[in-house]
Image (spheres, grey):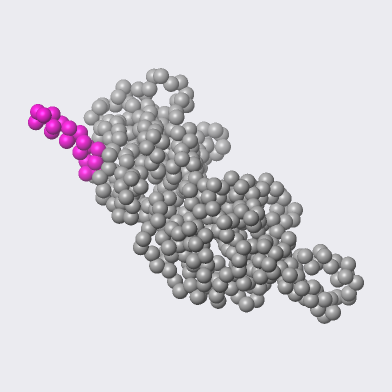
């Protein structure tokens, strides 16, 4: 190779790196962000990557000097590559990941002609090689200034959104966002299997210019879709402090799909015996229970501010990954409202896509009822839980901690107590077609009405309640084969592991 030729190559290559753009890098750091290449390096722990389209520039040769394009539109605002994620934990074949990292320091990460083509190419590689995808979505949406494109009128013949969505159920797709994410960028973020965003994210299906252009008023970018809003409405699965934590969370989330790990520990399992209050009507913090049951530090809580009567997440037992569904009696007494039902259905769908077994920890009085619940779309959203459970292609292990009542309890086990490969209960388990108190009020309505209000009526109510509790306690349910077994809470981990054949 001629020396001049090689020097030209190295000069062109180096122009794509952070060192060639000190002003842009400094500006990014001053605002508390990281560069796209810093995120890439962190994702692969400094490992080697194969970068695609590294020398692309914006399709604006007809309006800008070529050297200016090289200096100011490096990569056309996105890095696309394949590289190893969690290579210290998994073999090369399992670690290899398709990486798409928008570069906000280049034209605000907007989606230009070659920008889209680079992403399309990487998504095609992911489909062809069955690679998981991690995508950083920061950017301002479509870019109208690419004047070199003469074969499109509206710029809508773009395969990116279809290719990204078509990967659902074929490979894991994790989206990470920091900063502004509008229009097409937001569509890509929202379509991911799992969505991580920093606290400084602003995500909207239109940015300020599009909103104002549509006659809908003038807004500052920070008025549109801040993280606290999207944490509450379920758009964001996990809110991270910054890009470093978001990247760590993305790697950790990917590891559940990548498989079993051998380095794990757990808390003393006998602590589970005293985890529930002696008074069956009292609430407790199920997160303490989950942290005790699962491998230390393995539980990843998804959408904690949304659908709060149900907890969903990812975790491990003896290094084996699975999806988690759990009741939270601190909210609505553990009753599953429409929002929580949709959240649980999404967990079933994620488990199916990522091929993860489900462990369901049940303590619910059933579905939330009443006129307000119907306004929220209860019949459709609650039924989605049954549909998602029925179409789940992974095993479920159900553990009843306390209350297993009505259709809600059935939905927590995939739609029927016969669905789980093991339906176990702690001794505190209690079962019935509806909550015991409600069953007494309904079943003995006439008898209660005939007794004057006061101690005598209360005594009659408590007596009937006690009778129902005895008929519905865990050992009785097991004697009728409604559940498979009653277990010592300290044996929960072992029961789950044996049921999953591990």
| Residue located at (39% from left, 50% from top) | 258
Percent coordinates x, y for residue 103 in the rendering: 34, 41
**Left or right: residue 61 compared with residue 169:** left
Residue 161 visible in the snapshot: no
Name the residue at 60% across, 49% down: 389
Q: How many numbered discs?
A: 0
* Quarter of the figure with the C terminus: bottom left
Q: Quadrant of residue 408?
A: bottom right
Farthest residue toward the bottom?
Answer: 455
Residue found farthest to the right? 450
Q: Position of residue 376 (x, y in %)?
A: 68, 49
Q: Where 274 sits versus 441, above or below?
A: below
* In the foreground, 289 or 218: 289
Q: Position of residue 144 (x, y in %)?
A: 42, 29
Q: Is residue 493 magenta?
A: no
Residue 274 sits in quarter: bottom right
Q: Residue at horizontal 73%, vertical 70%?
A: 471
Q: Is residue 293 visible?
A: yes
The magenta-colored residue range is 1-20
Q: With 203 as the anchor, is 464 left or right in this view?
A: right
Which residue lies most toward the left here?
A: 3
152 and 478: which is toward the camera: 478
**3 inside magenta stretch:** yes
Where residue 89 sits in the image (x, y, percent)?
33, 55
- Which secondary structure class fits the magenta region best? helix
Please state if 254 lies on the left or on the right of 384 as rendered: left
Q: Name the image quarter holding the N terminus.
A: top left
* Residue in the image at 45% along x and 21% along y: 153
């Amino acid at each position: 190779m001629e020396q001049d030729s090689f020097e030209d190559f190295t000069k062109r290559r180096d122009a794509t790196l952070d060192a060639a753009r000190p002003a842009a890098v400094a500006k990014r750091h001053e605002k508390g962000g990281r560069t796209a290449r810093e995120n890439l390096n962190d994702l692969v722990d400094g490992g080697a990557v194969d970068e695609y389209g590294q020398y692309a520039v914006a399709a604006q040769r007809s309006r800008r000097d070529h050297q200016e394009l090289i200096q100011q539109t490096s990569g056309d605002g996105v890095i696309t590559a394949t590289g190893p994620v969690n290579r210290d934990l998994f073999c090369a074949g399992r670690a290899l990941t398709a990486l798409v990292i928008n570069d906000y320091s280049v034209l605000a990460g907007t989606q230009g002609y070659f920008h889209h083509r680079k992403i399309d190419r990487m998504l095609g590689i992911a489909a062809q090689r069955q690679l998981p995808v991690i995508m950083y979505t920061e950017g301002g949406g479509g870019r109208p200034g690419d004047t070199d494109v003469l074969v499109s009128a509206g710029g809508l013949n773009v395969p990116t959104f279809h290719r990204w969505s078509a990967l659902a159920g074929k490979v894991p797709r994790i989206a990470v966002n920091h900063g502004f994410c509008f229009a097409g960028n937001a569509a890509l973020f929202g379509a991911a299997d799992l969505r991580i965003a920093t606290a400084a994210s602003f995500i909207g299906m239109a940015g300020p210019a599009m909103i104002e252009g549509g006659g809908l008023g003038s807004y500052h970018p920070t008025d549109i879709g801040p993280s606290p809003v999207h944490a509450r409405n379920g758009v964001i699965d996990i809110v991270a402090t910054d890009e470093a934590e978001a990247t760590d969370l993305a790697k950790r989330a990917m590891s559940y799909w990548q498989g079993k790990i051998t380095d794990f520990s757990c808390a003393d399992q006998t602590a589970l015996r005293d985890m529930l209050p002696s008074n069956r009507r009292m609430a407790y913090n199920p997160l303490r229970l989950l942290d005790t049951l699962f491998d230390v530090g393995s539980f990843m809580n998804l959408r904690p501010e949304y659908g709060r009567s149900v907890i969903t997440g990812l975790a491990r037992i003896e290094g084996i990954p699975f999806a988690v569904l759990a009741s939270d009696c601190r909210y609505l007494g553990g009753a599953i409202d429409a929002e929580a039902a949709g959240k649980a259905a999404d967990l079933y769908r994620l488990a199916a896509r990522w091929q993860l077994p489900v462990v369901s920890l049940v303590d619910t009085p059933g579905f939330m009822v009443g006129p307000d619940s119907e306004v929220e779309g209860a019949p459709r959203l609650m039924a989605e839980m049954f549909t998602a459970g029925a179409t789940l292609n992974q095993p479920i292990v159900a553990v009843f901690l306390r209350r297993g009542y009505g259709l809600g309890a059935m939905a927590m086990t995939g739609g029927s107590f016969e669905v789980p490969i093991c339906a176990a209960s702690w001794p505190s388990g209690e079962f019935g077609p509806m909550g015991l108190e409600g069953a007494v009020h309904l079943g003995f309505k006439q008898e209660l009405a005939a007794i004057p209000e006061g101690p005598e009526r209360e005594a009659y109510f408590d007596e009937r309640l006690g009778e129902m509790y005895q008929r519905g306690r865990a050992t009785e349910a097991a004697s009728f084969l409604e559940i498979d077994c009653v277990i010592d809470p300290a044996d929960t981990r072992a029961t789950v592991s044996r049921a999953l054949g591990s």
